[in-house]
Image (tube, rainbow, N blue to C red):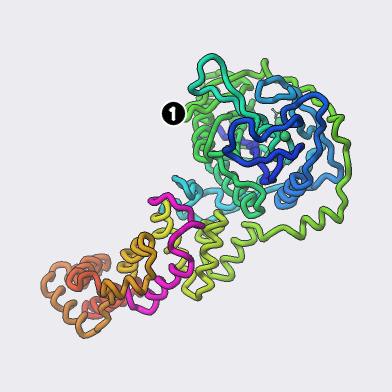
Amino acid sequence: MSTYEPVIGLEVHVQLKTESKIFCACSTEFGREPNENTCPVCLGLPGSLPVLNERALELAIKVGLALNCQVSPRIKFDRKNYFYPDLPKAYQISQYDMPVSSKGYLMVVGAGFKPAPTPPHPSLSPSEGERAKVRGRRIGITRAHLEEDAGKLLHEGIKDGSWVDYNRAGVALLEIVSEPDLRSPEEAFQYLVSLKAILQYLGVSDCDMEKGSLRCDANVSVRTRGDAPFGTKVEIKNMNSFKAVQKALAYEIKRQSEALESGEKIIQETRLWNESKGETLSMRSKEYAHDYRYFPEPDLVPFSVTNTRIDEIKKSLPELPQVRLERFQKQYGLSEYDAYVLVSEKSLADYFEASASEKVSPKMLSNWIQSELLALLNLKKVLIQESPVKPKDLAELIRLIENNTISGKMAKDVLPEMFEGGKSAEAIVREKGLVQVTDTRLLEEIAERVIQANPKVADEVKSGKAQAIGFLVGQVMKETQGKANPRMINEILSKKLALSTRGKA
Ligand code: ADP
Ligand code: ZN
Ligand code: MG
């Protein structure tokens, strides 16, 4: 075990899904012509005045409540001054000493899992080997405050200078700051997955990192393992996926540990993650740190939010991932792990529930969604909400396995056809004559033949090497062109070789 222990705190910026910007009526629609969504307010023209978008405040309070925060009864905005061309007013309206929400926490479920790869479901399908028991850890939320987003500078492909697009300037942002409670890059990854799930359940944001509606800066220091005080932190920016956050943290922890090991001191600085090089590079040290000269925004008068309003918003909260996770275990008898995987992505959990309402085995359903269906969706780059195989269709396929019409193996061939051709499971099974051989007499005959033809393997099985039976099952399957029921073959062979049946295919 390394002598150094990482200490991590994350700052997440999330764009709130409001139709208009936070202080003006401009549209927030993504992908419009550059500077189409602008007006005197978000361009910072003299004489214009901001007006708070009530919906942005409502969404911010929703997040605060879902993160178990105290919601401030008093709403106040401040100016954060800095000069950069993406900020037309040369200050950002933000919140300094009175954030909408503070002092909350988030249960990070699955802290301890290794994260998993590839869109469209980046949080899903850790390999079998990683199916450790789900654990939860409570991570403190320091604060969540409202602010306006900045514009975007465009440098690429432009000779002589840069261009600026102010469509994003003034879009409502919520900055969610965690306590330095995270202790590994994996845990940071899981924190992000859990946070994103909550935001998606609340419906407050697209959470699309590619479009920049979710962005994360990571703060990390290392200290001697145990109770030593925190070390000097470094802030890392420029990661554009949760995976990248994890990789950048791992790189940085190694860099800092090695530096300390060789007697160097860590300096407080901001570093940029370079994805292609896989390393962090210094951007600016604390010496050049900004003095933001915060002061109360004089154009927006502080005001109060009544308890009645906060209670109303509380009542409107949907079922959140943590609660759904527990319900999935109770209601469907799923393992904590399976429930966790389904629940982490709202669309996946919704699909599962829609399919489970067709009264098929939830466990089987969960397996089919997590393995076969997700594999197909990933391969074809289709989101589960747009799956051509609807929840009802998948349930129909599973019912055919349950009532022994087809084997699981056959079903694996049927599913891609359903996906491609839009035909029902039953129609494909009928067309292909895929009906399972369940004639016991016939199977017994074939099993006998296979045993005679493979005396060595049969002896191995008899002498206790139970796994060897798999080969014989495979041979029977082959003889029936894959149409036999593997569980039946297993039972027949076991009986013939006087083994106790294992009940497993
Ligand atoms: P700053 O004033 O530099 O913005 P903050 O105290 O506001 O620093 O913390 C910013 C983020 O850094 C928070 O997410 C916090 O949890 C994290 N953080 C603070 N101190 C440390 C530390 N020593 N090591 C790692 N992360 C830290
Ligand atoms: Zn505007
Ligand atoms: Mg700070």
Residue marked by disc 1: 276
- Residue 223 lies, in percent from the top left, at 60, 30
Lateral position of residue 113 relative to residue 86, left or right: left
- Residue 203 lies, in percent from the top left, at 65, 52
**Three-letter amino acid code at disc 1?**
Ser
Q: Which portion, as a residue range, is magenta?
A: 379-406
Lateral position of residue 71 relative to residue 435, left or right: right
400 inside magenta stretch: yes
Front residue of 46/435: it is 46
- Could you tell me which quadrant the C terminus lies in? bottom left
Ligand 2 shows up in the quarter that is: top right
Q: Main secondary structure of the magenta part?
A: helix
Q: Residue at x 38, y 75 (%)?
A: 400
- Please, is residue 315 above or below residue 452 in the view? above
Which of the 4 image quarters holds residue 82?
Answer: top right
164 inside magenta stretch: no
Front residue of 136/28: it is 28
- Residue 289 lies, in percent from the top left, at 68, 19
